[in-house]
Amino acid sequence: MPGTVRFHRVLKAPTERVYRAFITPEALAKWLPPHGFVCTVHQLEPRVDGTFRMSFTNFTTQQSHSFGGKYLEMIPNALLRYTDIFDDPNLSGVMQTSISLKPVSCGTELSIVQEGIPDAIPTEMCYLGWQESLTLLALLVEPEIQQ
């Protein structure tokens, strides 16, 4: 049965900056891959019905896995919902990820739900990967750099 993971974080950054980190190719390549991986964004059309394609490459082994998906719902600075489909036939199925952003007094409350994780991927590995990615996201969006 496909797995589901849920995350809740508060980031010390405005919702606009956090949202932008999810729809900017260079930003995604910087924060999305978990430790030990690099990301190549091949295509990104951040609009409803727009598509994306990426590859994560294991820096140690140089083995890559590619995936793509489609944006289902986008409310700027508030909500992103998209699908993910792996190219690898051993990782079949369609994952769906929902990202909710809410402004709070100290920044942005971020809620993530990822559903339909293929059986071949242990849910605990998804938790570990997302935790690492969210740490990198905070490092990208929280600094207030003035020029």
Image: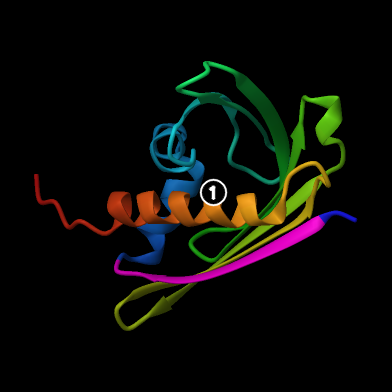
Residue 127's quadrant in the figure?
A: bottom right
Vertical relation: 10 (above or below) 50: below
Q: Secondary structure at mark 1?
A: helix
Vertical relation: 129 (above or below) 111: above
Task: Determine the residue located farthest toward the left in the rendered image.
Answer: 147
Residue 21 image point, x, y percent: 42, 48
Q: Nearer the viewer, residue 1 or 85?
A: 1
| Picture colour scheme | rainbow
Residue in the image at 65% along x and 25% along y: 65
Task: Find the magenta span and give its range.
Answer: 3-12
Residue 67 image point, x, y percent: 69, 30
Residue in the image at 30% along x and 49% along y: 140
Residue 77 image point, x, y percent: 48, 62
Image quarter (top left, top right, bottom left or bottom right) of the N terminus? bottom right
Q: What residue is shown with label 1?
A: 129
- Residue 26 relative to residue 126: left or right: left
- Residue 12 relative to residue 29: left or right: left
Image quarter (top left, top right, bottom left or bottom right) of the C terminus? top left
The overriding secondary structure of the stretch rendered in magenta is: strand
Task: Determine the residue located farthest toward the top in the rendered image.
Answer: 62
- Residue 128 relative to residue 28: left or right: right
Residue 141 image point, x, y percent: 31, 54
Task: Determine the residue located farthest toward the right in the rendered image.
Answer: 1
Disc 1: CA contacts within 10 A as few (<14), some (14-19) or many (>=20): some
Residue 64 drawn in magenta: no
